[in-house]
Amino acid sequence: MLLQRIQQQFIDSADLKYQCAQALAPEVEAATNAVLAGVTGGGKVLSCGNGSSAAAAQRFAASFMGRFDRERPELAAFSLASDAAVITGIAADFDMRSIFARQIRALGHAGDVLLVLSTTGNAANVLAAVEAAHERDMTVVALSGARGGRLVQMLRDTDVSVCVPTEVEARILEVHQLVLHCICDGVDAQLLGLPDSFTLEQENPA
């Protein structure tokens, strides 16, 4: 019984990802282009989220400042969920709703990109972060799930929404991670061209 349940987890994840490959590819492409425009225009990406989404935001920033799959020049990205002293200090002096927004008002500029991750789209500190980003004339790339909650309702025409069509949190997180990989890979492809292995696979399919 446990073995079958484990196998079903893999199947459910694969089925949703296949569905999203068709449904979300245009939005992921738009998100990639927004991030690319920001960093090549002299801006940076500020990322944030709560819990597992905070970990994803940190990993994204690491891939940008370090590397994703190939060597390339460093790209400017910073996770707002990384500094415990800053987060706890703001929470203690103000409230949890302000932990990202105050950092954005301090660090964000027009031309920067805010990458927010929220499985429900209703996290108060994420919504406040979007408000702060708009005050700074930043573009927002929002990764959410289900119907996107209040988050998608706040977005402007110049922002990008990638909303995973399920309410299962684990599945949303899995697709979010894949979307972040696609953004990193897409930026690399635009900056460096397609890798040789990709070209060979396309020219000589198995």
Image: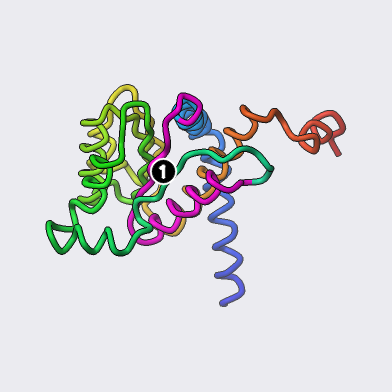
Q: Where residue 137 appears, x then y in whole percent? A: 27, 27
Image coloring type:
rainbow
Q: Which residue is found at the position 38% from the left and 42% from the top?
A: 46
Secondary structure beneath dot 1 equals loop
Q: Which residue is found at the position 67% from the left and 30% from the top?
A: 192
Q: Where residue 48 appears, x then y in whole percent? A: 35, 49
Give left or right: position of 149 versus 116: left
- The verdict on residue 166 being magenta is no
Quadrant of res 181: top right
Of 200 and 67, nearer the camera is: 67
Of 57 and 123, nearer the camera is: 57
The C terminus, quarter of image: top right
- Residue 103 to residue 170: above or below: above
State which region is magenta.
39-68
Q: Residues within 10 Å of mark 1 (few under 14, many from 20)?
A: some
- The verdict on residue 51 being magenta is yes
Q: Which residue is found at the position 58% from the left and 69% from the top?
A: 6
Q: How many marks?
A: 1
- Residue 16 to residue 1: above or below: above
Quadrant of res 112: top left
Q: Where residue 199 appears, x then y in whole percent? A: 79, 31
Q: Where residue 183 appears, x then y in whole percent? A: 53, 38
Give left or right: position of 169 versus 9: left
Q: What amino acid is found at the position of numbered circle 1 in the picture?
A: Pro
The N terminus, quarter of image: bottom right
* Outermost residue toward the bottom in this view: 1
Q: Which residue is found at the position 37% from the left and 26% from the top?
A: 111
- Which residue corresponds to mark 1? 165
